[in-house]
Image (spheres, grey):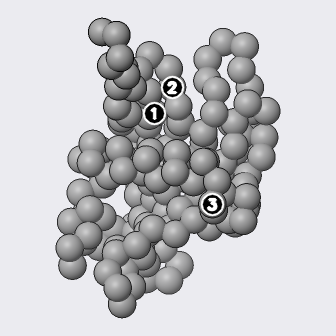
Amino acid sequence: MLGMEKTPPSLQVEPTRTKDFGPCPCCGDKSRTVWGYVHHGDSTEAVYYVQWTLGQVARHGAHIDLIIGLWGDGTGPEDRVGVSLEFRHTERGPEFMVIDASSRKEFSRDLAARLLSREEVIGTPLAQQAFDIVDAIWSQDGRISEITAHESS
């Protein structure tokens, strides 16, 4: 309709795989990584990985690693960047914080050519994009219920 702005499609999460590994060198418990895709309309916006130690979210928190950019035929690692966030419980409650992606050994240079530092993300449109992606994962991927259940702890 004339004068009406078209609302962009919301982000849709497509969970794919899960892998358990460990033991954690700190506590001896197993850790889990889940991953999948985040789509915006018909295009893929990001691949995500969420990692935490089972039964230790309050102690260790969790990590969310995002590979954001262009996907599909004719694209490659140079079209994407890595962004990492850490989920922690603080005195103010549960929080996400952008961290240096290069500190996360889980990133593959086969998927993202550049792993961004915290300073390269904070205060940019990419920061909002990353937090929007995390919001979609948080609300749509039921495999992370152990983490999201601690949100109100």
- The residue under the point 35% across, 44% down is 136
Residue 4 lies in quadrant: top left
- Quadrant of the frame with the N terminus: top left
Label 2 environment density (alpha carbons within 10 Å; few <14, some 14–19, many ≥20): some
- Quadrant of the frame with the C terminus: bottom left
Residue 77 lies in quadrant: top right
Q: Amino acid at mark 2?
A: Thr
Q: Are marks 1 and 2 in contact (CB under 8 Å)?
A: yes
- Asked whether the viewer can see residue 21, the reply is no
Residue carrying label 2? 44
- Asked whether the viewer can see residue 7, the reply is yes
Count every numbered label the image shows and give the total.
3
Eye-nearest disc, 1 or 2:
2
Q: Left or right: 21 with respect to 83?
A: left
Labels 1 and 3: the sequence-earlier one: 1
- The residue under the point 66% across, 12% down is 73
The disc placed on residue 123 is: 3
Location of residue 107 with respect to 42 vertically, above or below: below
Labels 1 and 2: the sequence-earlier one: 1
Q: Amino acid at mark 1?
A: Tyr
Query: In front: 19, or 112?
Result: 112
Q: Amino acid at mark 3?
A: Gly
Instruction: Tell which residue pokes out farthest to the front in this image.
Output: 3
Q: Left or right: 106 with respect to 91?
A: right
